[in-house]
Image: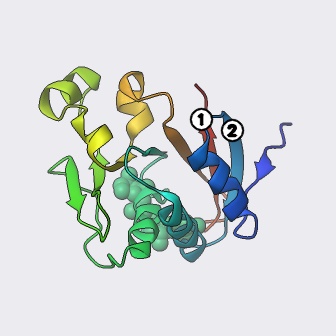
């Protein structure tokens, strides 16, 4: 059994400071017991995110990818209009900063070739990118400093989610 270092709302500031301000590899676990716990984690990430950051969110349908991103957006005062950009691939949120947030859902893209042709990588540098399904579809073209978040549901407890937050360069 592998015990990952636990990230909680109490130690999140120290850990997120490291995650966002170094290039180092890491692996943390966050346990969410409710939709609200997941929103709170997203909101915390909002405090640290800046231009050039890329975060992928991976996990089955209904695991909480969009809930996390809703929480992140709420840090910037964006409350209502955060839904998966299923038909447009990317939504842009203009926040009160000198960079925008790009919210991708690449579920309907076949592979990274299609992403490069249709979307391109300029977004990676022009703003902060949040990419639902990123690792399943375009992992081969993601920059090394990408922050990966995998979300796991629990068969017994319908509200339990385990987050694995990692970077491996
Ligand atoms: N601990 C939890 N964290 C997040 N969501 C939870 C949790 N417990 C229950 N839920 C519910 O699970 C659902 C998650 O939906 P969400 O749209 O975020 O999933 P998703 O991963 O974005 O799915 P899709 O791949 O379809 O876009 C919501 O209805 C939410 O209320
Ligand atoms: Mg979603």
Residue 23: numbered disc: 1
Q: Secondary structure at mark 1?
A: loop
Closest to the observer, 69 or 123: 123
Closest to the observer, 104 or 122: 122
- The quadrant the C terminus occupies is top right
Q: Position of residue 107 (x, y in %)?
A: 30, 41
- The quadrant the N terminus occupies is top right
Q: Position of residue 143 (x, y in %)?
A: 43, 29
Q: Which residue is mark 2?
A: 26
Vertical position of residue 51 compared to residue 34: above or below: above
* Residue 34 seen: yes
The residue lying at 35 percent from left, 30 percent from top is: 137
Label 1 CA crowd tier, 10 Å (few <14, some 14–19, many 20+): some
Vertical position of residue 122 compared to residue 161: above or below: above
Seen in the image, is 101 located left or right of residue 165?
A: left
Closest to the observer, 43 or 87: 43
Vertical position of residue 134 compared to residue 62: above or below: above
The residue lying at 75 percent from left, 70 percent from top is: 10
* Residue 107 seen: no
Label 2 CA crowd tier, 10 Å (few <14, some 14–19, many 20+): some
Q: Nearer the viewer, mark 2 or mark 1?
A: 1
The residue lying at 51 percent from left, 69 percent from top is: 43
The residue lying at 56 percent from left, 67 percent from top is: 44
Q: CA distance from mark 2 to mark 1?
A: 9 Å
């Amino acid at each position: 059994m592998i015990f990952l270092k636990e990230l909680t709302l109490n130690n999140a500031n120290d850990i997120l400071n490291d995650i966002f301000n170094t290039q180092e590899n890491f692996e943390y676990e966050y346990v969410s017991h409710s939709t609200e716990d997941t929103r709170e984690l997203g909101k915390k990430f909002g405090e640290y995110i800046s231009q050039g950051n890329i975060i992928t969110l991976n996990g089955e349908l209904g695991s909480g990818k969009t809930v996390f991103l809703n929480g992140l957006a709420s840090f910037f005062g964006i409350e209502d209009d955060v839904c998966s950009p299923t038909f447009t691939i990317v939504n842009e949120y203009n926040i009160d900063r000198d960079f925008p947030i790009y919210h991708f859902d690449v579920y309907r893209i076949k592979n990274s070739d299609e992403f490069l042709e249709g979307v391109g990588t300029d977004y990676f540098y022009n703003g902060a990118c949040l990419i639902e399904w990123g690792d399943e579809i375009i992992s081969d073209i993601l920059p090394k400093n990408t922050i990966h978040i995998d979300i796991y549901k629990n068969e017994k407890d319908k509200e339990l989610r385990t987050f694995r937050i990692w970077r491996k360069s």
